[in-house]
Image (cartoon, helix red, strand yellow):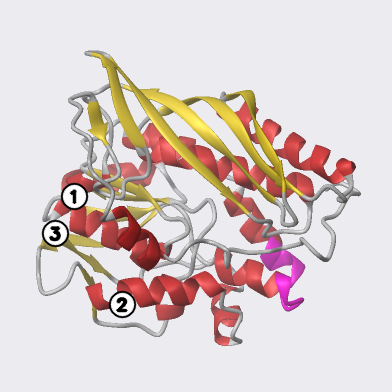
Amino acid sequence: MTACKLTAKVKAGGCASKLSPKILDRALAGIPRQANENVLVGFDTSDDAGIYRLSPDLALVQTVDFFTPMVDDPFTFGAIAAANAVSDVYAMGGKPLSALTILAWPAAEDPAVLEQILKGGAAKLQEAGCVILGGHSVNDPEIKFGYAITGTVHPDKYKPNAGAKAGDALVLTKKIGTGVITTALKRDMAEAKHVDGAVASMTTLNRAAAEAMAEFDVHGVTDVTGFGLLGHAREMAIASKVTLEIDSAKVQFLDGAVEYAKAGALPGGLANNRDFVASCVEGSSEFDDLFYDPQTSGGLLISVPEADAAKLLKKLPQAYRIGTVRARGNKPIFIR
């Protein structure tokens, strides 16, 4: 950890500034779709990244993500932002290659803090084998930081969220709860060991998960980030025209997450997610708050054939099964 710290004005901002999915969904509905045979994945299915075919054997994977600080240490914030940005490429089965930095920065803020943010991001991107080519910055009273990532994938081997099939197993590669833990940090409620656990999760690349799933006939994938587990499950279910049955007893939470949720450390984005997704959910659980909790640099939600589920889990010891894909029922998501 560095000696520099984010100031009280901008520290641990959390996910509250993320645009409501309801507003975003309504705005996107009015955007005309452009016909182009080389666009393999656009924004129609709310996928994690776009895919554009360059040749019969090569396609670009493109994504962008940035946000306000959710931890106090600037180097760690930069690393989390980088891991979160490249995750969308991994979720599509791609390999991240290059990055452009996106930065909003208060002119009066200490440049040493900015240096640490940039160093943290650069270190994590180097770990991912992704080079920084440049970027763009603006003067802004609130810190915002992230990257636009470009990667590659074979046009026939990308993994959309629209491919989940009835009978598949649902596998999640990380525990959830980063939103409530970082909100508890912001409110001075969080224990250091719980923050450390959340940071370890958020700074872990999804590269190993992407490499492992590439060995199997995975049908659908999405990463679980700002719209929470149920928000991203909704996108997969609707795009695939199936119902995702989630066993609430099997979902795993980061240490401290359940306690902080019960204590009311709920990020603003959680209420937005619930407002948007709840009408698509049948059933409930005592952990409902955490199912809507906005995640930062969360795990991959993978729809894999039942016959391959145990093999995938063996390759990814940290992953676990949370449910099954069913034929479309009354709602896109069923919780039991």
Assess disc 3: are there few (<14), some (14-19) or many (≥20) residues with their C-alpha within 10 Å of its C-alpha: many
Tag shown at residue 164: 1
Query: Which residue appears at 36% of the width and 69% of the height?
Result: 250
**Residue 218 falls in image quadrant:** top left
Residue found 19% across the figure and 58% down from its top: 238
Range shown magenta: 186-195
Residue 138 coordinates in the image, percent (x, y)? 70, 42
Q: In the image, is 287 to the left or to the right of 162?
A: right
Tell which circle, 1 or 2, labels the residue nearer the N-terminal end: 1
Residue at figure coordinates x 67%, y 74% from the top left: 184
Q: Amino acid at mark 3?
A: Val
Up/down of 192 relative to 264, above or below: above
Q: Secondary structure at mark 3?
A: strand
* Quarter of the rendering occupied by the C terminus: bottom left
Q: Tell me the kind of residue under disc 1.
A: Ala
- Residue 118 sits in quarter: top right
**Disc 1 crowd, CA 10 A, few/some/many (<14, 14-19, 20+):** many
How far is the residue under mark 1 from the one under mark 2?
21 Å
Q: Is residue 255 magenta?
A: no
Total numbered labels placed on residues in the image: 3
Q: Image point 43% across, 64% down: which residue?
A: 228
Q: Which residue is mark 3?
A: 242
Q: Position of residue 78 (x, y in %)?
A: 69, 43
Q: Is residue 238 left or right of residue 25?
A: left
Mark 2 crowd level (few <14, some 14–19, many ≥20, 10 Å Cα): some
Question: Is 128 or 239 nearer to us in this picture?
Answer: 239
| Residue 66 in view of the camera | yes
| Amino acid tagged 2 | Ala
Q: Please give the residue where the numbered disc 2 appears in the rendered image.
A: 278
Question: Decide: marks 3, 1 in contact (CB < 8 A)?
Answer: yes
